[in-house]
Amino acid sequence: MKTIVITGATSGIGLETARLLARQGFNVLGVGRDEERCQRAKESIVSENPEASVTFFTADLLHQREVTRVASEIRSYLDEHCNGELHALINNAGCVRSWHMTTEEGYEHQFALNHLAGFLLTHLLFPALVKARGRVIMTGSESHKGTRMHWNDLMLRRRYNPLTAYKQSKLCNILFAKGLNELYGASGIRAYVVDPGLVNTNIGNKETGRLVSFIWSFRKRHGMPPSVPAETYAFLCRQEPAPEGLYYHRLEEKAYSRQVTSENARLLFEISKRLCGIEDYAGVSE
């Protein structure tokens, strides 16, 4: 049974993807930040599929110490139950913020959770992914096409705009995937970004101001149910051999921004390593 880790797995896209993958026979390891919600998510999956193999881990991935801790717990589980192999890591956890907020490391929340958390978790689980010739999947957005990297002010301290911060974090997702493929594809891993489209979830209602929450509450009514994009994550996990594309929407490969270049991908990789205190990414030479 192949094992898949999904972050942000207690609601929305993450929960529906976990539900679908468990139904398709995968061993699902979900990560959520609240223990009670993790338990409810597990009960929801098992209630409709008593044979489901699903385990939840609790961590607030905004904080790098929490990413490191939960990665250690997941590695121990993989070594004990899965021969140290991880078939896929789905970096789905994300947030939207109305104002400039920083983590204990001093990093802007959307950059920290939407990008750095997945970057660090992938690094820490890399040996298990390599052993399984696994896949890394990021939850992206078409909004990455409408922005650029603010290299001189990545945390947007000088002029914060929540939409700019979100768009930049989504551009980071696809640059990270491109960097993984170009720098470490020879190790057997493959990285992707899924653009879920407009989905009816509560991401815009969590820890946001009244205006953002109101706008999102109106907009999400026009979104598809999260079970729809879940099919694309399952497709990328299931296909053999691994698909060759980078950016997918509704089961199909799509075009992406011209900002997604090898130069930008490598620059983001180097900056992200420094921000996470990493010298050699996964100990694999570049």
Image (cartoon, rainbow, N blue to C red):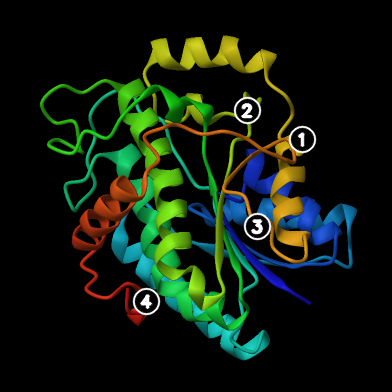
Whichever of callouts 3 and 4 sits on the residue coming sooner in the sequence is 3
Residue bearing mark 1: 228
Residue bearing mark 4: 282
| In the foreground, 63 or 146 | 146
| In the foreground, 166 or 146 | 146
Residue bearing mark 3: 39
Residue 218 placement, left or right of 109: right
Callout 4–callout 2 Cβ contact below 8 Å:
no
Amino acid at the residue labelled 3: Gln
Image quarter hosting the N terminus: bottom right
Amino acid at the residue labelled 2: Gly
Whichever of callouts 4 and 2 sits on the residue coming sooner in the sequence is 2
Residue at image position (41%, 73%) is 124
Whichever of callouts 4 and 1 sits on the residue coming sooner in the sequence is 1
Residue at image position (80%, 51%) is 20
Residue bearing mark 2: 197
Q: Helix, strand or loop at disc 2?
A: loop
Amino acid at the residue labelled 4: Ala
